[in-house]
Amino acid sequence: MLKTEKRDEIVRAALETIAEHGFHGAPIAMIATRAGVGAGTIYRYFENKDILISALYQQIEGRLYPFILQGYEPKRPIRERFLHLGKGLLRYFLENPLDFRYIEQFHNSPYGAALRRARLQASSGNQDAFRELFEDGISQQVLKNLPVTVLFALAFGPIILVARDQILDFTRMDDTLIEKTIGACWDGIRR
Amino acid sequence: MLKTEKRDEIVRAALETIAEHGFHGAPIAMIATRAGVGAGTIYRYFENKDILISALYQQIEGRLYPFILQGYEPKRPIRERFLHLGKGLLRYFLENPLDFRYIEQFHNSPYGAALRRARLQASSGNQDAFRELFEDGISQQVLKNLPVTVLFALAFGPIILVARDQILDFTRMDDTLIEKTIGACWDGIRR
DNA sequence: TTTAATGGAATGAATATTCACTCCTTTTGG
DNA sequence: CCAAAAGGAGTGAATATTCATTCCATTAAA
C-alpha cells in the first residue's frame, strides 16, 4: 500500500468511527483496526490524537466549501445567492452524513469553540461567502437588520436540525422538501 | 446535611462540571469534590454514572417545561402561542446557561438520540405543547404545510444557535433582540 | 545488506466502580 | 432515663478497566 493510501485509510477510519461513536467512543485501537493498520502506525502519520482530529476537520472543510461554492455567483441578487448556499449546504450534509456528524461533534467540543473564537479575529476566508452575503443583504435593506450572528442562526439553525433529523432517521428529505425548507429559512431572514 | 440536600448537591455539582467540561471531562472524582462528598457516596444515590446523567436531564426538563408553559394559553391564536413558547424557551436558555449546555451535550450524545427515538413512539406529554401548536397551525392553514419535524427545525434551530452564541460570548441578546429573533422564526414557519 | 516502515504487545496514566470500614443516629432493653 | 446494640449513610483507598502513547522485534523496500 502506498504511503498516501495508508494515510487516507487512517483518516477514513477515524471519520467513520468518530462520526458514529463520538470522540470518546473512538479509541485509537478501534480506528487502527478499522483502517487495517497497527495502532502504532497511526503515530507515524499523526503526532497524536488531537492532531488527527484537527487534520480531519480541516480535510472535511476542504471538501465542503468547494462543493457549496460550485456555481456560486457573488454578483447575483441576495435571495438567489442565499438559496444557492443554503441548498448546497443542506445537500452536502444529507449526502455526507459522516462529515456532518463529525462537524457537529467537533463544534460541540472544546476544539470547535476554540476554532470559532480564533476565526472571529481573522476571518478565515471561506465562511466569508456567508458573512459577505449577509452584510450585503443588510446594507441593501433586503435582509432584516439584525446582527450577523443572529442571521447565521436563522439560516443555519434549521439546516442543522433538519440534517440531524434525517441522519437519525426521523425524517426523509427529498428535493422538493429541501427547496421548501431553504425557502422557509429565507423567509426568516428577509426583511 | 439532610439526605435530599446531599442528593441535590451531587446533582448540582454534576450539572456544573458536565456543562462546563462535557461528559468526558467530568470524572466522578471531580463531581464528588465539587459536591463536597466522597466519591463512593454518589453511588449511594445513583447506580452508576449513566443513571446520574439521565436523572439530571430529566430534572432539567422538569424545570424547563413549567417555565415555558407559565401563562401559556392553548386557546389563543397560533402566532401568539408560538411567540410565547419561543420567547420562553430562548429566555430560559439565556438565563440558565448551565442547563442549556447540559441539554446540548445530552442531545449530541447517544443518550439524546435514544431518548428522542423512544419519544417518537409514545409522545412524552411535555413537548406536546409544541407538536399540538404546529399541528393546529397546519390544519388552520396559518403555518406552512411542512412535516412537523421541519417546523420544529425552523423554530428551534435558530434559538439553539443564538443561545450557544451568547453563552460562548459571541453575541449579547437583550429583550428587543430576543423579540426580533423569535419574530423572525415566526416568519420562517408562517404561511 | 542497510534503512525505513509497520504492527501490536507493553506501559503508565486516568477513570469508574467497589468495598471494608467509620461514625452517627435511632432503636431497644434494662 | 440511660447504656448498649443495631442500622445504615458516608468515606476514600483499592481494584479493574480503558486508553493514548511508546518501543522494539519483524517485515518490506531500496
Image: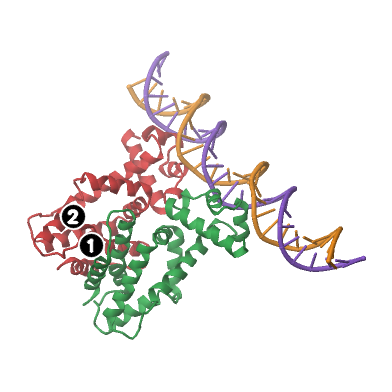
Chain colours: A red, B green, C purple, D orange
Q: Does any portion of residue A59 appear in the rendered image?
A: no
The x, y position of residue A181, in whole percent, is 23, 68
Answer yes or no: do the residues labelled 2 and 1 have beta carbons within 8 Å? Answer: yes
State how far apart marks 2 and 1 are (Cα).
Answer: 10 Å
* Callout 1 crowding tier (Cα within 10 Å): few <14, some 14–19, many ≥20: many
Q: Badge 2 is on which residue?
A: A130
What amino acid does circle 1 point to? Ala
Residue A58 place in picture, x, y as percent: 28, 44
Instruction: Using the image, name the chain to which the residue with label 1 belongs.
Output: A
Q: Quadrant of residue B52?
A: bottom right
SS for callout 1: helix
Question: Which residue lies most toward the left here?
Answer: A75
Q: Please state if A72 lies on the left or on the right of A170 as rendered.
A: left
Residue C25 in the figure: left or right of residue C17 = right
Residue at (45, 58) in percent of width and height: B110
Mark with earlier residue (2, 1): 2
Residue for badge 1: A155
